[in-house]
Amino acid sequence: MNIGGAAAHPILTVGSVALDSVRTPAGEASRMVGGAATFFSVAASFFTDVRLVGVVGEDFDAERTVVFEGRRIDLEGLQRVPGDTFRWRGEYGADLNTRETIYTHLNVFEAFEPRIPDRFRSSPVVFLANIHPALQLQVLEQVRNPAFVALDTMNYWIEGTPAELKAVLRRVDAVIINDEEARQLSGEPNLVSAARAIRALGPSHVVIKRGEHGVLAARREEFFAAPALPLADVRDPTGAGDTFAGGLVGYLASSEARTHDVWARAIIAGSTMASFAVEDFGLGRLLRLTAEDIRDRFQAFKRLTHFDAL
Amino acid sequence: MNIGGAAAHPILTVGSVALDSVRTPAGEASRMVGGAATFFSVAASFFTDVRLVGVVGEDFDAERTVVFEGRRIDLEGLQRVPGDTFRWRGEYGADLNTRETIYTHLNVFEAFEPRIPDRFRSSPVVFLANIHPALQLQVLEQVRNPAFVALDTMNYWIEGTPAELKAVLRRVDAVIINDEEARQLSGEPNLVSAARAIRALGPSHVVIKRGEHGVLAARREEFFAAPALPLADVRDPTGAGDTFAGGLVGYLASSEARTHDVWARAIIAGSTMASFAVEDFGLGRLLRLTAEDIRDRFQAFKRLTHFDAL
């Protein structure tokens, strides 16, 4: 059940663990285990060891914890505190491209202070899921010279805490955001110009997620683009972005080389994992996944996009 | 100046030749030679011989005809009649994704009846540009067993003349339309389902153009997807879709084989030509293009999308 070998580098990730309630045109589901760090960790754990730092409440019972069991996910950094777990409810429009947040109850996540267990402080790869950039900085203060740091963020922080966000951007290697966020962060409507402007803020790698339109990624001066897999039946897009990040960073961490070729395969590994995530509610499809499923679908991406030179 | 050899199959195309006036965030230009059949023919003529059937007015002077000169474009089917040439004026929004038509003066195009010169009737490849589906049918009545017929259409005919459109769709091999049109024609919001529904109407090949998001193409059961080339400086998107069709059908006509591999390269040839079209106003960039430019950019698409198997 793993693709990267035992020698793959471990990843430290810090972010939300949540209970999600979702309604989509395909149906409805309540209080599923979700959250950015959860989707990321489950996806990345197919490739390497993952160290999850986050917080849950007393309602996060054994039935919930089971999603992490039997996987390469170390929960020493998952704090359990009095109160309720972060809860979110969202409803999707008919075409799944629009989403309305019905509620966001931060609960125990409101006072979350990332404490990185000593064992995790020399993690060579770090993924900072979408949390307050000041907390992302706190994480970086606690780790020792990671070789590769990737970050997600959102409109709320781009608008509300631009100085903190820029401070953390100066210290990361990769930013993984959606097209709207890329335009907002850079002030550039054109994505090529946006990627260039974001690189000028620090990250040498900029990954722009375009949902059903796929991904545009810049690694220094060079672009790589991948379509999304054409899927007739998308049931729940929640977590697809974090799952993409999990596949991408997981694949990178499982590879020794830092070349354009490895980077391109990492984008496809991310796209592969995201294509599974949307096929069922919550973590449903990811929890049933095998390494063979992943290899087969990666190959489907190859067939979908491959052409020979003229 | 040509990529397909002398043995490439000739293409018959029927559609508009126009004088376009355009305003985009990059500037403004008036009465440029345009029209679907024009963009298609100029693009396809880099790959094979093109036979253009259309109509222009007395205002289409020698200065205008020059765009066709020195190219593999046979103008025997270009009628010249009293009156003015079809004129269109459009203005693009800041992000180039929205377009407002300021006027459409059909002029001599209003009474256009496609008459296919005898020499053109056995053309093995036919491209029916976006005109009334009844006229598209008239063209097919005049040609003898073409090996491959492709068609473009638009919202106006999908809504206004669905019966005629379905009659012509039953007789074509490929339909090349944008995502909005695909959804409207099929009644399916999901593009995978839309492609399937459109194939059930007749065409074995369905090409869905998504503008800056690239192309999703179905050849029978199999999909091929290509991103658009990331361009920082798009000056005028007018004609990009017809230029795409010209590259696609031109490449197909220049190839003997009818395999998935040839089809995939044809999609990239179309994307390559379209990426040039948007770099300048009207035909500007296409008229300066060399075969070497085309080969280089095709290779840029390869670099943009290539990854190795896991």
Image: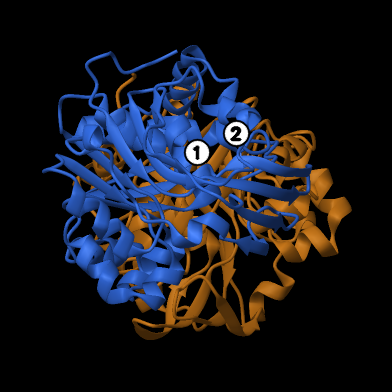
Chain colours: A blue, B orange
- According to the picture, the residue beneath numbered tag 1 turns out to be A39
Q: Secondary structure at mark 2?
A: loop
Direction from residue A122 to residue B185 in the image, left or right: right
Viewer-nearest residue: A64 or B110: A64
Tell me the chain of label 1: A
Asked if B64 appears above or below A175 in the picture, the reply is below
Q: Residues within 10 Å of mark 2 (few under 14, many from 20)?
A: many
Instruction: Choose the circle earlier in sequence order: 1 or 2.
Output: 1
Viewer-nearest residue: B209 or B111: B209
Which residue is drawn at the image coordinates 71% and 74% (left, top)? B110
Query: Which quarter of the figure is the C terminus of chain A placed in?
Result: top left
Viewer-nearest residue: B84 or B237: B237
Q: Position of residue B247 (x, y in %)?
A: 42, 46
Query: In the rendered image, which quarter is residue B221 located in?
Result: top right
Query: In the rendered image, which quarter is residue A187 located in?
Result: bottom left
Q: Position of residue B146 (x, y in %)?
A: 63, 33
Is the residue under label 2 in contact with that under label 1 (CB below 8 Å)?
Answer: yes
- According to the picture, the residue beneath numbered tag 2 turns out to be A283
